[in-house]
Image: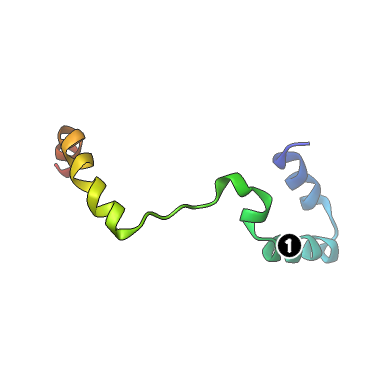
Amino acid sequence: MSAADVIELIKKLPPEERAEVMAFARNEPATALTPEKKIGYVSDEKFDEVVPRVFEKHAELLHRLAQ
């Protein structure tokens, strides 16, 4: 069953049951449902190390985007 199928089923629920589903969805962390999609953060030191290489490698693209 796809997410679209589930959404259509939820739309057909009576208001009380729809509210129960929404309350569940609000309290369920998205990362618990898809752990492979956790947001990663880079350290400030690593960021400072990588930024010059990114700008050098993609200088033409960044120049075009700035226009």
* Quarter of the image that includes the N terminus: top right
Describe residue 57's horizontal placement relative to residue 7 as left or right.
Answer: left
Where is mark 1, residue-wise? 22
Image quadrant assignment for residue 15: bottom right
**Residue 64 spot, x, y in % from top left:** 16, 36
**Residue 24 spot, x, y in % from top left:** 75, 63
User: Where is 8 relative to 61, above or below?
Assistant: below
Residue lying at 14% horizontally and 41% vertically, measured from the top left? 67
Describe residue 36's horizontal placement relative to residue 48 as left or right.
Answer: right
From the viewer's side, name the closer residue of 19 and 53.
53
Describe residue 12's horizontal placement relative to residue 41 as left or right.
Answer: right
Residue lying at 85% horizontally and 62% vertically, measured from the top left? 17
From the viewer's side, name the closer residue of 47 and 11.
47
Circle 1 residues within 10 Å: few <14, some 14–19, many ≥20: few
From the viewer's side, name the closer residue of 34 and 67.
34
Residue type, label 1: Met
Residue lying at 76% horizontally and 40% vertically, measured from the top left? 5
**Residue 8 spot, x, y in % from top left:** 76, 45
Describe residue 66's horizontal placement relative to residue 17 as left or right.
Answer: left
Give SS at disc 1. helix
Residue lying at 68% horizontally and 51% vertically, measured from the top left? 33
From the viewer's side, name the closer residue of 13 and 47.
47
User: Where is 48 relative to 5, above or below?
Assistant: below
Image quadrant assignment for residue 43: bottom left
